[in-house]
Structures are given as C-alpha cells and as structure tokens.
Amino acid sequence: MTAGRRTVVVIRTRARDRAAEALRAAVGLTLRGDRVDVVRVAPLDEADPRVRRCLGTLAALGHGVDAPLGALREADAVEVWS
Amino acid sequence: MTLGLVLATPPERGDCERAERLARAARRRGLEVSIFVMDRAAIWGAGERASALVDEGCEIVLCGTSAAAAGVREAAPGVVIGSQDDHAALVRRADRVVAFT
C-alpha cells in the first residue's frame, strides 16, 4: 500500500450548496487513508448543519478544517471549489 | 500513467466540454483516464457524451448521491454509479488530477 497522499480542498464559493458539496467531497476524500486539508478562501456558514457535520467529521478524524494557504505547497492533489 | 478528472460543475459552465477534450487528448497519448462525476455535473454523467468517452476507453463513475439529487435515475451506458469512495480512490491512484470543481 502506498503512503498516504495529501489533498487540499479549497473552498472559494459563498454559495451554501456548493460549499456543502465541497465539504462532502472533502470527507469522501479521506476514505482511502489520505490526509485532507480544507482551505477557506471564502467564509463557511457554520450554522448550516451540513457544514457543521462535515467539519466535525473531518476534525474528529484528524484532518485540517481551516488550513492555511501554505498547505497547497505540500499537496499531492488540489480541488478548488468555486 | 493515469489522468484523473473530477467534474462537479454544471454543463453550462463549459467544464464538461473541457474535460471531454482533455480526456480525448490524454487517450490519444495512451494515458488511462478516470473521471469522477458529482454535484451539478451529474446530469452530464447520464448523457450520451459520457457514454462516448466510455467507448473511447475512459472509466467514468457517477456519484450516486449526486445522481439522486439531480433526479438521474440511470447513468449513461458504461458509466458506473458509485460513491465518494470512488472519488477518493481516483485521487489516490491517479498520477495527475485535474478538478473541474
């Protein structure tokens, strides 16, 4: 098994549904053992239960939920959600 | 070498066509191409353009949750209905990933 890779999910949309989908994707990206970091270029509505649930899951699994832009330098893959 | 594409934007944004061109160019060069379709691109995954890429040797997986949300009852012929685990698998095994998100 190859060593875990690092994926950064950049959220730069203010649209609630798109942000929720980006976070759902971020949670999904953890399923094969890779490290996931979420970079918030746009603010997230943490009152949205979908956002809260995904961020909670990511945090509970030890992934980054508010990573700095510098995380991009270490990334093997990047998804920018706009 | 494997090129992974993640497609999550609505067709009107033009990314579906860009992904198709990129996939075809990669296939012409002999690369394996895997595409994960989700969110607002789900409707593309139900169409003949997705089938055409499958016929040209691309692997296409459509997120089942996104398909259901888009009212897609059936994927295009050759397109597999999958999950976010397939998304993770694609990103993990691809040598390069281009995300239209």
Image (cartoon, grey):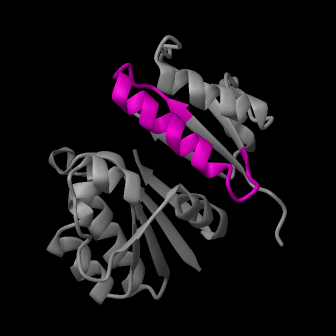
Which quadrant would the C terminus of chain B be assigned to in this image?
Answer: top left
- Name the residue rendered at 63%, 40% in the picture: A8
Residue B18: percent from left, percent from top: 27, 59
Which quadrant would the N terminus of chain B be assigned to in this image?
Answer: bottom right
Quarter-of-image position of residue A19: top left
Find out whether residue A28 is within the magenta segment.
yes
- Name the residue rendered at 36%, 73% in the picture: B23
Q: How many dots with numbers?
A: 0
Find out whether residue B58 is within the magenta segment.
no
**Magenta stretch bounds:** A10-35
Residue A5: percent from left, percent from top: 75, 55
Quarter-of-image position of residue A56: top right
User: Is A73 left, or right, of A11 in this rendering?
Assistant: right
- Name the residue rendered at 52%, 44% in the picture: A25
Residue A46: percent from left, percent from top: 53, 13
Residue B48: percent from left, percent from top: 16, 75
In the image, residue B34 sits, relative to residue B45, either above or below, namely below
Instruction: Tell me if I can see residue B17 in this picture.
Output: no
User: Is A69 left, or right, of B63 in this rendering?
Assistant: right
In the image, residue A9 sits, relative to residue B43, either above or below, namely above
Instruction: Tell me if I can see residue A17 in this picture.
Output: yes
In depth, the one of A33 and A37 nearer the eye is A33
- Name the residue rendered at 54%, 33% in the picture: A10
In depth, the one of A81 and B86 nearer the eye is B86
User: Is B75 left, or right, of B58 in this rendering?
Assistant: left
